[in-house]
């Protein structure tokens, strides 16, 4: 689909789209949630999603070769696992930026050394999807941990207070002083458990990276 000389441009476009969506998505989503309803976040994504499906159906070539070979190369498996877990281990924005720059770019540049030229586009698509999946899994895990921790405070919170806190952490300011301190401790413990879960993701990433090690590193031609 893309000639070798256009690989760099394609990588830049994909990275830019991800960067803009990662920055603007939470901001626009928060504004929509504060001033309207969260359902509009879903509704606004339907037209672009339909447009993308139509474009894929119309523009995607139908002559891709089919392969029945099993994925037995540890180097390739390490690439895929590293891409999957990489999106969920970064703690700060600075580390996130460094991580994306050091991992995504190096993966795209090194791709020609481990895959055939005809599979380059498939690899880029799989890498992008794995990054999005990794971020989604990390977000889902952290949200579930914090939600479970907040629900553990049901012994001293009313049902209305519980629902308000699950909707927005800012609700803690409306609680009595004694309950505010208790909820801060609950949120703090939840945050610690989130960091423990993300540390586990980080350990999985290290293992995936070790699977890429070779006694004789491959060279770019």
Image (cartoon, rainbow, N blue to C red):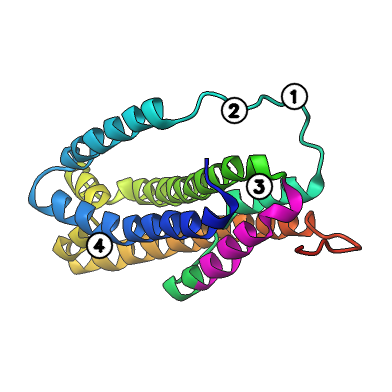
Question: Closer to the observer: label 1 or label 4?
Answer: 1
Give the magenta range.
Answer: 98-115
The residue tagged 2 is 64
Image location (x, y in percent) of residue 190? 44, 58
Majority SS type along the magenta span: helix
Q: Is residue 88 visible?
A: no
N-term mark: 4 or 2? 2
Image location (x, y in percent) of residue 22? 36, 58
N-term mark: 2 or 3? 2
Q: Badges 1 and 4: C-beta atoms under 8 Å apart?
A: no
The residue tagged 4 is 179
Secondary element under disc 2, as helix, strand or loop, is loop
Secondary element under disc 3, as helix, strand or loop, is helix
Q: Residue furthest right?
A: 215
Question: Closer to the observer: label 4 or label 3?
Answer: 3
The residue tagged 1 is 68
On screen, residue 166 versus residue 200, left or right, reads: left
- Local crowd size for mark 4, using a 10 Å CA cut-off: few (<14), some (14–19), many (≥20): some
Residue 56 vs residue 48, the one in the foreground? 56
Image location (x, y in percent) of residue 92? 45, 71
Q: Badges 4 and 3: C-beta atoms under 8 Å apart?
A: no
Badge number at residue 80: 3
Q: Is residue 99 magenta?
A: yes
Residue 121 vs residue 41, the one in the foreground? 121
- Local crowd size for mark 3, using a 10 Å CA cut-off: few (<14), some (14–19), many (≥20): many
For residue 52, what is the image quadrant?
Answer: top left
């Amino acid at each position: 689909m893309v000639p070798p000389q256009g690989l760099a441009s394609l990588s830049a476009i994909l990275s830019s789209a991800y960067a803009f969506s990662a920055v603007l998505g939470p901001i626009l989503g928060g504004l929509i949630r504060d001033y309207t309803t969260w359902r509009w976040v879903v509704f606004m994504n339907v037209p672009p999603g339909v447009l993308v499906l139509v474009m894929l159906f119309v523009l995607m070539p139908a002559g891709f070769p089919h392969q029945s070979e099993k994925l037995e190369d540890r180097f390739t498996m390490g690439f895929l696992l590293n891409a999957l877990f990489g999106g969920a281990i970064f703690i700060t924005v600075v580390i996130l930026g460094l991580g994306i720059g050091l991992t995504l770019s190096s993966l795209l540049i090194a791709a020609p050394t481990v895959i055939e030229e005809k599979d380059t586009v498939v690899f880029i698509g799989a890498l992008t999807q794995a990054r999005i999946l990794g971020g989604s899994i990390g977000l889902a895990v952290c949200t579930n941990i914090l939600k479970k921790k907040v629900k553990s405070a049901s012994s001293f919170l009313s049902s209305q207070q519980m629902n308000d806190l699950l909707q927005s952490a800012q609700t803690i300011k409306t609680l009595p002083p004694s309950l505010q301190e208790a909820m801060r401790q609950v949120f703090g413990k939840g945050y610690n458990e989130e960091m423990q879960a993300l540390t586990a993701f980080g350990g999985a990433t290290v293992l995936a990276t070790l699977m890429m090690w070779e006694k004789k590193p491959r060279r770019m031609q």
